[in-house]
Image (cartoon, helix red, strand yellow):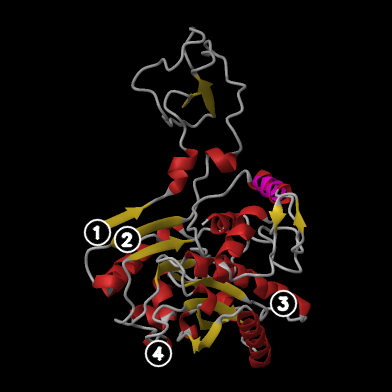
Amino acid sequence: GVIAAIVPLTAMAFVQPNGLLRHVSQNVNVDDAFRQGSGSGSGGNIFQQNKNAVTTELNMAFKLKEGQTSNMFEGPAPLVKERDACGVGFIANTENGGEFGSHKVLQQGLHALNCMEHRGACGGDGVSGDGAGIMTQIPWKLFSDYTSDSCPKPGVGMIFLPRDEKRRDAVKEVIESVCKSNELGFIGWREVPVENSVLGPMARDVVPSMWQFFVKAPERLSEDDEDRDGFERSLYLIRRRFDVELRLRGLVWDDNDSEVYVASLSSRTIVYKGMVQGCILPQFYKDLTDPDYTTKFIIYHRRFSTNTNPRWPLAQPMRVVGHNGEINTLLGNVNWIKAREASKGLSLLGDADESGDCDIKDLIDKESTDNILQRCNTQDNPNVLDPLIDLGRSDSANLDAVFELMT
């Protein structure tokens, strides 16, 4: 009943197909042309270096005569010679521990995360990590003070807030207001127990204040399906309202205590992550050593930051995805998503057109939320919903946003 995987996806993304490229020494004695996959041995990627230069032979095109060197371009060095990327994997046990799993799965996942340290990187202080994190089932036993017979599985938000109490209280007020205005029963706040002393200097200087909040599903969703898809859609859309309201109220800052970020908001899963090394994660988040933290699965991620500076929100897993490697088609993907959203062609203000109604004001009704996700442009109306994608985020964060919309 146990499934485990460690997935260095870079090997999948950048490995050269057998028989296409061979690195050979500079002097080559061949004269046949246009013979694919020839040469001694089984072909594939053979790296042979001497004190002279290394050239590339394209077997599928032609062979070099004696004394010739290849004029073929084998690709940008960062893509063909460097192999740095994140580490990601998962462990699942669906047989033991009953409905809520076991603490052992969490322990095994954290141990596996620690073994992925070679896939990650650290900051200039040598201690702060580019990022590490886990996604698990929500540990309901740990959160028993926030559940009840009438609400056994509320929505749970994991949120990074400013350290300054005045700023933090102002943001909390907005979060509560948005939830209540969208018919979520606000149950309460929980300060996540952490140990800042284990952080490196760079991470400690910008560490957010860690909080969780709990919300009850609206009465209108009392007939939701067993998988609670309607509640999950509402939580997703309401979460995208938070940043809009914060901007409208001027609660946006540009200093080292400005972070407001929802790491997860769901009645199914929760994310613990940060700008740390893998071994530091359970030392920082004390919840992760509590025996009441149980789960059937764990997705773990150790980050190697390549095209963005490390930040607490950019640690992974994201809300849906734990991603390894760079997305080299990022600009193309962003433009395709913008075109796709615009092509839905429905009114953003709830007016009807020939395609039907597109009411993005009702974020609760099951049919309405399904209609919003399937038929409404959620990218280009920043006064209603936070844009789906944004180049200010990392490539993985944008990928996660698209998968979140799809799921």
Disc 2 crowd rating (10 Å Cα; few below 14, some 14-19, many 20+) is: many
Marks 4 and 3: CB-CB under 8 Å?
A: no
Relative image position of residue 389 (x, y in whole percent): 67, 57
Query: Sequence-wise, which precedes: disc 2 or disc 1?
Result: 1
Disc assigned to residue 2: 1
Task: Pick the residue in front: 201 or 294.
Answer: 294
Q: Is residue 165 visible?
A: yes
Give the residue type at disc 4.
Answer: Asp
Instruction: Nearest to the eye among marks 1 and 3: give it.
Output: 3
The residue carrying mark 4 is: 145
Tell me the magenta residue range.
Answer: 333-340
Q: Is the residue 226 above or below the residue 164 in the image?
A: above
Helix, strand or loop under label 4: helix
Q: State the residue at coordinates (47%, 85%).
A: 192
The residue singled out by tag 3 in the image is: 245
Camera-side mark, 3 or 2:
3
